[in-house]
Image (tube, rainbow, N blue to C red):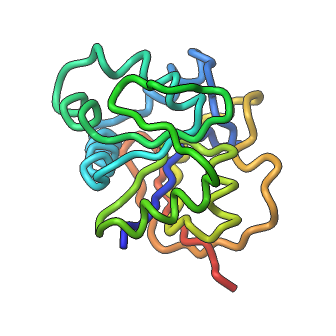
Amino acid sequence: MRKVIVEAEVSLDCLTGGERPEFWGKVFQHHSDDVVEYLNELLAMPDALVMGRRTYEGFAQIWPSREGREAERINPMPKYVASRTLREPLTWNATLIKGDVAEEIGRLKQQSDGYLLQYGVGELTRTMLQAGLVDEIRLVVFPFVAGQGDPLFDGFELTNLKLIDSRTFASGAVALHYEPSRE
């Protein structure tokens, strides 16, 4: 069975940048060689991506025109997009999830071994967590305070997480790997 990994890059005050270029500028300042290696190792793991609408729209604007190893990996990879507003056909090798999102993600998990990866945290993450579909949450916390932005888990139900791994990078960023508690 596939495992679902959710990955997000956040500031020390657990805010995400959304579409704020200044936030991402700060994040990229802290993308030391070991952070880039870590993110490339993560990208090498999944055989498909699951995405919400906002992530899909942002990534589909940027990635198809990129070149290099990361683009060669992510562009042909199947993508499954949860959205109530998008209509088919989708571009960038993407399929719209139809029907009950949790049921469909559950079916995707059952199809094979391997990994499904979701970049970012949002409504799709909340849906998957509530349905018990998330196997791991990986946060890369960068050493700056954003002061404003989207709170990482805003609107989520109380969820216990168990720390299963951590890693400190040369830039001062920290990767934290959590597993949702099934208790």
Residue 167 shown left or right of residue 105 in the figure? left
Residue at horizontal 66 percent and vertical 67 percent from the top: 131
Taking 105 as reference, is 24 above or below it? above
Q: What is the quadrant of the N terminus in the image?
A: bottom left
Q: In this view, does 73 lie above or below 163?
A: above
Q: Which residue is drawn at 40% across and 55% down?
A: 116
Does residue 31 lie above or below 29 as drawn?
below
Q: Can residue 9 be seen in this view?
A: no
Closer to us: 164 or 106: 106
Asked whether residue 114 is in view, the answer is yes
Residue name at image x 32 percent, y 41 percent: 78
The image quadrant of residue 12 is: top right
Could you say which quadrant of the image residue 84 lies in?
top right
Residue 98: image x %, image y %? 56, 45
Q: Give the percent coordinates (x, y) of residue 160.
A: 71, 73
In front: 1, or 166? Answer: 1
Picture quarter containing residue 87?
A: top right
Task: Report the front residue among 92 and 39.
Answer: 92
In the displayed structure image, the side of residue 101 where residue 24 appears, left or right: left
Left or right of 176: which side holds 102?
Answer: right
Residue at image x 34%, y 44%? 39
On the rendered image, what quadrant is the C terminus found in?
bottom right
Residue 136 percent coordinates (x, y): 50, 65
Where is 176 relative to 28, above or below? below
